[in-house]
Image: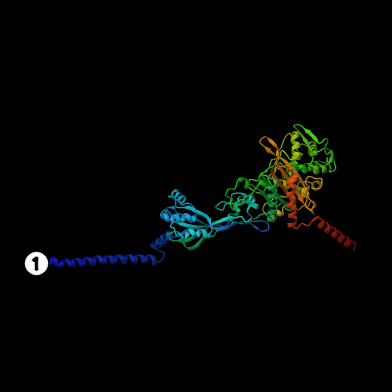
Amino acid sequence: MGAVKKEQLQPGIARWRFMLVATLLCLFALALVLHLARLQVVPATERGYQFLQDQGRARTIRTEEIAAYRGTIVDRNGELLAVSTPVHSLWANPKLLRESSAEQLKKLAGVLEIKPARLSVRLEKYRNKEFMYLRRHLTPEQAGKVLELDLFGVYSKKEYRRFYPAGEVVAQLLGFTNIDDRGQEGLELAYDEWLSGQPGAQQVVKDLKGRTVQELAIQREAQPGQDLRLSIDMRLQYLAYRELKHAVAENGAASGFMVILDTHSGDVLAMANQPSFNPNNRQGVKAAAMRNRALIDQFEPGSTVKPLTVLAALESGRYKPHTQIDTSPGYIRVPGKTLVDPVNYGKLDLTSIITKSSQVGITKIALDLEPNTLRELFYRLGLGEAVGSGFPGEIPGVLPSRSRWHPIERANFAFGYGLTVNAVQLAQAYSVLANSGLKRPVSLVLSGDKDSAEPERVIEGPLAKQVSAMLETVIGASGTGRRAKVEGYRVAGKTGTVHKVGRSGYEDSRYRSVFAGFIPADRPRLAAVVVIDDLSHDKYSGGEVAAPVFGSVMAGAMRLLQVPPERVRSAKRQLAAQLSERGSKS
């Protein structure tokens, strides 16, 4: 009987236990729901709600850097020389990307245009890292092909890439930026802080694969860099580059460079170099092609400083333009060397010494002057000191100072040996002659403040004009620079032919061809220097190689700048004089 009761009670006990467990589970679920509801609905002042909100944000909201736009570089007329364009860079979390299948990684390598083995090596190298670049600076289309693979751990971010519309024409002056858009060479480096912007920050919502699904508030606006306006006139730059490139190729020279200055302001209007390179694609470019030779290379100026020696003679008061110098018998012995002229010119006045570029005549003048006279004048004209362009690596040249000058040193100094200059320094010195003795600061960047700066008088005006008149004879039929002639305009200038220095001294078969001058001679507008370097052919003199480049470039420059020819200006002066005369009579 007891056994029968026990068997009857078992089902009841089981139902009671079941109901108890079910009730407890329901109560637990209800409590959980109430707790979650309280956390989600109760105002944010409660800690639980705030905690969960913070945790949710921490898992989905990220702060991303907003790339800053680098300032543009333009020429004096606003033509774009350097501009940053938006691009996409792909990066990956190697820890997540390694979980992809071999087939997926193979597809990724194919789209990236790299070998699968190389991708595997990189993933292995960065296996303990959370960041590595896959490819940088891709177009939106190129980046889209990778993102379409929808691989876990592959992301994209916006960056900027520098582009140079003028390419190789002004490459050495501008320089370039690295892949992070920071200046590395040239003016890009010199003005990197000015051009660089300040990156911003923005909150974004990311999905589980790290893709941005929503952009939230901007925490800090990106500040773009400031623009840079250069003094360069790209019309003249293209012209100078074209003629220089032709001359270097035609004469088999190793290199060449040219500088054009505005004599009114001191602005550098053109600065061309050969050989050059394409800054938009620097693969395989040699370092020599990146050098801005016009400011970085120093060279002995040769006979282009002979007019400065004559100027020193005029300043001494002991010489006049018509003073006669006897150059017979066509050579002069100086302790250590014999200096010769091509022929025996006999007696020459100071003007003819410049016209014929007489070595003997210049040497006799130099030995008659006080030893430090030439050095002091050269220094006043800007030789031996940096022009203050701000260009990285600008060379100041070498202007020796001696407590005692040997005769051969004084002679060499007088005709451009034993000192070194850069092309801009030499152009500035000739600009002083063009400006009747006024020296203006040289600039690569346009500045309103500079334009109002007072020029410095370093030479008496009448003396500078006397030397300028002598330089016009060099372009005449009997002068060494007649190939620099520009039809319709008066040109003043001087040629220079310099022996190159080798391992064992000056070499007889290697030359540097130089021409320095200004135009129009009566009312100068432009001063320029042309250097064609390392010539070894039969044609190597300054009058044969460098002077024609000056003539071709200046002929085009006069048209571009709309400078009227001499006959037009003369007719205007005559008309003005006639009108003035009529007005005074009436």
Q: Residue 101 or 574: which is nearer the viewer?
A: 101
Q: Residue furthest right?
A: 585
Among the 4 quarters of the image, the one containing residue 199: bottom right
Q: Residue furthest top?
A: 335
Quarter of the image where the C terminus is located: bottom right
Say if residue 543 shows up in the picture.
yes
> Quadrant location of residue 71?
bottom right
Is residue 197 visible in the rendered structure shown here?
no
Circle 1 crowding by C-alpha within 10 Å: few under 14, some 14–19, many from 20: few
Q: Please, what is the three-letter code of the amino acid marked with disc 1?
A: Met
Asked if residue 421 lies left or right of residue 182, the reply is: right
The quarter in which the N terminus is drawn is bottom left
Query: Considering only vertical position in the picture, is 256 above or below 70?
Result: above
Q: Is residue 218 left or right of residue 10?
A: right
Say which residue appears at 24% left-offset and 66% top-offset. Answer: 20
- Where is residue 89 drawn, in percent x and y? 51, 56
Residue closest to the eye, 246 or 337: 246
